[in-house]
Image (cartoon, rainbow, N blue to C red):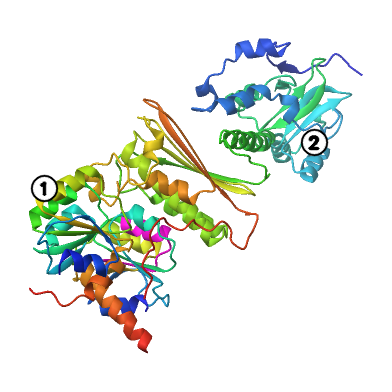
């Protein structure tokens, strides 16, 4: 799924756009250690962690799309790092559960 | 959907608390940040979390949650099980990721609606 | 009347309280261990005359020991002063009666067999002095004389105990009221409930137990569920705050007729910019705290959101004190000041 598809599914806005960023799976998590340990490569990360360190973790595990829930604001340092590392950020008013539901409705991901 | 149904749907195992409770899930909250869970006003929350600590149970108790599910088959400490038993919060361990659990629960709700 | 007969009366030569006080300094050990200041003050402030029994059952010197035995049995006492017109001549004890029965002199006069080597208390002595007497002598009671050396009362250990327990409960009630007055809210109701929990720095294994206790207390006291939840949320956030951001402190629950107050006070380090700290999403938390599910910067704003009134004071290097107050009787019970909807998003429902 593309950033645009993700954005439309969760009724969100694109805070950081990255051309070609896409995801084939979804991981829901707010603990960086947990994300690091369990998120698969090319996942869309559904989280509430609006923190610079989230970008670092995404870079490590290979997540190219972040879905930031509950309309959490994106701090400038996080946005800068995301753009630099090629991680797109979509901000949604939905909760993690609702965002997960919405993303599951997208066409099956190619694994 | 009771805690017993949740256990079944999420291929889970009840680790502590009353598995026969008739309370139904009022809302699903998938969150690892407890402050965020505390913000929630919904009743009879089912808390899906990766936070395998006492704090998940304590938070659930504060908001009057009907149960807690810990994902990825994370090992649960003795103290966490004890806190859950003491506070009477049903605690379920599931091998699923939080995302897969969200999707399964959602499908189950849809099925419930269709009767 | 007075035929020159007089018992030996042993007593201190104290003529006034100041003198007694000077001779009995407040030594906790003398009073049996580490007495609190309040108890010591009580023991000093209370005089024998405040506590003693004033109804004196006594016999004349010419009464028989059998008569003494009857009086003791009827009044369930184990010692009887031998006294005429206020003057104390001696004491007849149960032991004297037993000895008399054994030896067949129960019909003899009291005067013949009473103890006249007496230890007495003065009515103006502080209770601490009397306690020392009970400690030093094996007697269960002492006759009490006034300054004219007239018998005016009897003091038993039970009298002291009963008086102290009563006065202690009065003092403790005063203390409780005083402590509750330190909380900057009106405690208008007469009946209130107060409990305090120590919160230890960085002890996340215990953090939250106070909030859980509070929720249980509110449930027991049948506080409306929606209010109980808001109180517990504030308590939890503030408890976690003390635990992860401060050098340690206390969490206090105060329930009055009209309000519930949660006060969190810590011993520093204080907050330099309170406005910034209260804003959503601002946090000084490190990754360790985040890994435990906290540190999202919602603590203070969460507490503020759920409370009916919120107050924060802080001095850098000294303390932070947060007070959240909840109205138990909202003006319109229908809405009960329901928790403000979370801005700006909605939590997902079940379906």
State the residue lying farthest toward the right: C1
Range of the magenta residues? B55-71
| Residue C149 occupies quadrant | top right
Q: Are marks 2 and 1 on the same chain?
A: no
Q: Residue beneath label 2, please?
A: C65
State the residue lying farthest toward the bottom: B115
Q: Quadrant of the N terminus of chain B?
A: bottom left
Parent chain of label 1: A
In the rendered structure, the answer to whether residue C49 lies left or right of residue C64 reads left
Per the image, label 2 sits on a secondary structure element best described as: helix
Residue C256 % position (x, y): 62, 47
Q: Check the image and report above or below for C241 versus B84.
A: above
Per the image, label 1 sits on a secondary structure element best described as: helix
Q: Check the image and report above or below for B23 versus C183.
A: below
Mark number displayed over residue C258:
none
Question: Is residue B59 covered in magenta?
Answer: yes
Residue C119 % position (x, y): 69, 21
Q: Check the image and report above or below for B55 versus C7.
A: below
Can the viewer see residue C113?
no
Q: Quadrant of the C terminus of chain B?
A: bottom left
Q: Nearer the viewer, residue B20 or B100?
A: B100
Q: Residue beneath label 1, please?
A: A84
Q: Residue at x 35, y 39 (%)?
A: C200
Can the viewer see residue C251?
yes
Q: Nearer the viewer, residue C172 or C80?
A: C172
| Residue A106 occupies quadrant | bottom left
Q: Residue at x 79, y 15 (%)?
A: C147
Residue C142 % position (x, y): 70, 27
Q: Are marks 2 and 1 in contact (CB under 8 Å)?
A: no
Dot 1 crowding, Cα within 10 Å, few <14, some 14–19, many 20+: few
Parent chain of label 2: C
């Amino acid at each position: 799924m593309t950033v645009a598809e993700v954005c439309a599914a969760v009724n969100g806005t694109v805070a950081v756009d990255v051309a070609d960023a896409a995801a084939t799976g979804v991981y829901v998590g707010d603990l960086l250690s947990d994300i690091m340990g369990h998120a698969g490569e090319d996942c869309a990360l559904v989280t509430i962690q609006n923190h610079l360190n989230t970008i670092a973790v995404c870079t490590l595990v290979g997540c190219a799309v972040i879905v930031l829930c509950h309309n959490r604001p994106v701090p400038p340092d996080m946005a800068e790092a995301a753009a630099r590392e090629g991680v797109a950020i979509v901000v949604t008013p939905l909760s993690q559960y609702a965002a997960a539901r919405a993303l599951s409705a997208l066409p099956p991901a190619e694994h | 959907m009771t805690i017993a149904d949740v256990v079944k749907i999420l291929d889970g195992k009840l680790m502590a608390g009353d598995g026969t409770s008739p309370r139904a899930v009022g809302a699903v909250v998938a969150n690892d940040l407890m402050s965020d869970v505390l913000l929630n006003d919904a009743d009879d929350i089912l808390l899906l979390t990766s936070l395998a600590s006492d704090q998940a149970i304590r938070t659930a108790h504060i908001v009057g949650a009907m149960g807690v599910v810990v994902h990825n088959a994370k090992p649960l400490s003795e103290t966490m099980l004890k806190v859950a038993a003491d506070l009477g919060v049903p605690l379920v361990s599931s091998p699923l990721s939080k995302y897969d659990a969200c999707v399964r629960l959602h499908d189950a709700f849809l099925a419930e609606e269709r009767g | 009347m007075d035929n020159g007969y007089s018992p030996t009366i042993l007593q201190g030569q104290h003529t006034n309280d100041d003198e007694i006080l000077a001779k009995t300094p407040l030594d906790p050990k003398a009073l049996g261990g580490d007495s609190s200041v309040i108890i010591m003050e009580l023991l000093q402030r209370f005089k024998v005359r405040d506590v003693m029994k004033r109804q004196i059952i006594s016999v004349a010197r010419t009464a028989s020991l059998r008569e003494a035995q009857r009086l003791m049995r009827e009044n369930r006492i184990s010692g009887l002063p031998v006294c005429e017109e206020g003057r104390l001549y001696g004491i007849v004890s149960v032991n004297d009666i037993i000895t008399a029965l054994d030896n067949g002199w129960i019909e003899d006069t009291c005067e013949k067999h009473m103890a006249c080597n007496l230890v007495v208390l003065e009515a103006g002595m502080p209770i601490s002095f009397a306690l020392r007497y009970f400690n030093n002598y094996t007697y269960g009671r002492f006759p009490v004389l006034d300054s004219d050396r007239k018998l005016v009362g009897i003091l038993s250990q039970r009298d002291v105990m009963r008086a102290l327990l009563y006065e202690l409960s009065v003092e403790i009630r005063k203390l409780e009221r005083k402590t509750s007055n330190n909380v900057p809210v009106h405690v208008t109701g007469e009946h209130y409930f107060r409990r305090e929990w120590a919160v230890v720095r960085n002890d996340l294994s215990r953090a939250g137990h106070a909030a859980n206790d509070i929720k249980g207390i509110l449930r027991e006291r049948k506080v409306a569920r929606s209010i109980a939840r808001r109180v517990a949320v504030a308590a939890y956030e503030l408890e976690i705050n003390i635990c992860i951001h401060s050098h340690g402190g206390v969490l206090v629950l105060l329930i009055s007729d009209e309000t519930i107050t949660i006060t969190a006070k810590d011993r520093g380090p204080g907050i330099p910019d309170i406005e910034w700290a209260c804003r959503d999403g601002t946090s000084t938390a490190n990754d360790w705290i985040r890994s435990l599910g906290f540190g999202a910067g919602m603590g203070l704003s969460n507490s503020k959101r759920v409370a009916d009134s919120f107050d924060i004071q802080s001095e850098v290097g000294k303390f932070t004190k947060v007070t959240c107050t909840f109205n138990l009787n909202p003006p319109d019970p229908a809405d009960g000041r329901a928790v403000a909807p979370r801005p700006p998003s909605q939590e997902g429902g079940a379906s």
